[in-house]
Image (cartoon, rainbow, N blue to C red):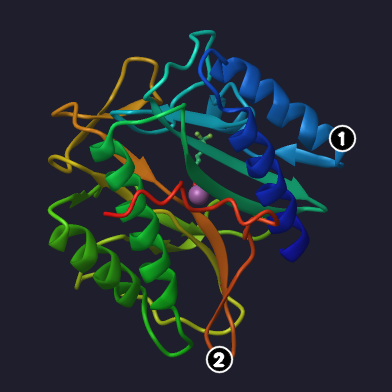
Amino acid sequence: MRRAGRLTAEALDLLMEATVPGVTTEALDRLAYTFAMDHGAYPASLFYRGYPKSICTSINHVVCHGIPNDKPLREGDIVNLDICLILDGWHGDSSRMAYVGEVPRKAARLCEITYEALMRGIAAVRPGGSTNDIGRAIQAYAEAERCSVVRDFCGHGLGRSYHDAPTILHYVEPSYDVRLRPGQFFTVEPMINLGRPAVKVLSDGWTAVTRDRSLSAQFEHTVAVTETGVEIFTLSPKGMHQPVDIGM
Ligand code: MF3
Ligand code: CO
């Protein structure tokens, strides 16, 4: 899991650097596929339940599962780059927000809030704790910042498989609470909207957008519950996680 996570993070470092005005998400997808092949890895999303690409590229009001295409990115876009690499049978799943050139202040603020929400959720992971500790930390912070937490997509257990138990909700749900134990692997991947939480899936069957067309952002790490707390497997070797600090 450490090696799969590190390779996934290296792929994201490469993709982040390549995300500039004029580049197509199709070109980023090709870069990701080539990187995976060059490193003996396979992109988990490719042909997963009919998904056609190696990464998801979710721009502006796209919440998640945006499909790479030949439309160039434009200055001011915010784009989530999501990749899961399988290395020696183990999955590393991570996503980050990239700024395309200079972005509007409200977009940068949303990305910073979403990154902070992810890290607060991860900080709530401890053996003997429970999944609602994660959701509570994320929801309390995001809503205090007058943003909303998407309900329709969640984090997930992973390891030898891509999607496994437990489900990780990014909000509090008293009717679902799983005890955290050392050795569990899962993702934390909050999607945070500037407007309302409701989403709809477009007719391609994948692209999820905010119903009110408000901006949406997401960050994702793969983590493990340890004897003493939490370990993050998908940390950037280049320290490229957080978007440029604009100072909220
Ligand atoms: N990051 C998403 C996840 O954690 C990506 C889904 S890939 C897709 O599952 F193939 F389902 F689109
Ligand atoms: Co995931």
Give the residue pinned by disc 1: 38
Residue nearest the viewer, comparing 21 with 171: 21
User: Residue 46 falls in which quadrant of the image?
Assistant: top right
Q: Position of residue 218 (x, y in %)?
A: 39, 46
Q: Residues within 10 Å of mark 2 (few under 14, many from 20)?
A: few
**Residue 131 in sight here:** yes
Q: Report the amino acid beneath label 1.
A: Asp
At a point 75% along the width and 38% down the height, the residue shown is: 42
Nearest to the observer: residue 106 or residue 33: 106
Q: Residue at x 34, y 71 (%)?
A: 134
Q: CA distance from mark 2 to mark 1?
A: 36 Å
Q: Position of residue 189 (x, y in %)?
A: 42, 54
Give the class, few, some or many, for how many residues have Cα within 10 Å of label 1's Cα (few <14, many ≥20): few
Query: Which residue is found at the position 74% from the left and 50% from the top?
Result: 7
| Kind of element beneath mark 2 | loop
Residue 162 in view here: no
Above or below for 114 versus 98: below
Answer left or right for 5 relative to 176: right
Circle on res. 228: 2
* Residue 82 versus residue 25 in the image, above or below: below
Q: How many marks?
A: 2
Q: Where in the figure is residue 241, as x and y percent of width and height?
A: 53, 53
Disc 2 residue type? Thr
Q: Which of marks 1 and 2 precedes in the sequence?
A: 1
- Position of the C terminus, as image quadrant, is bottom left
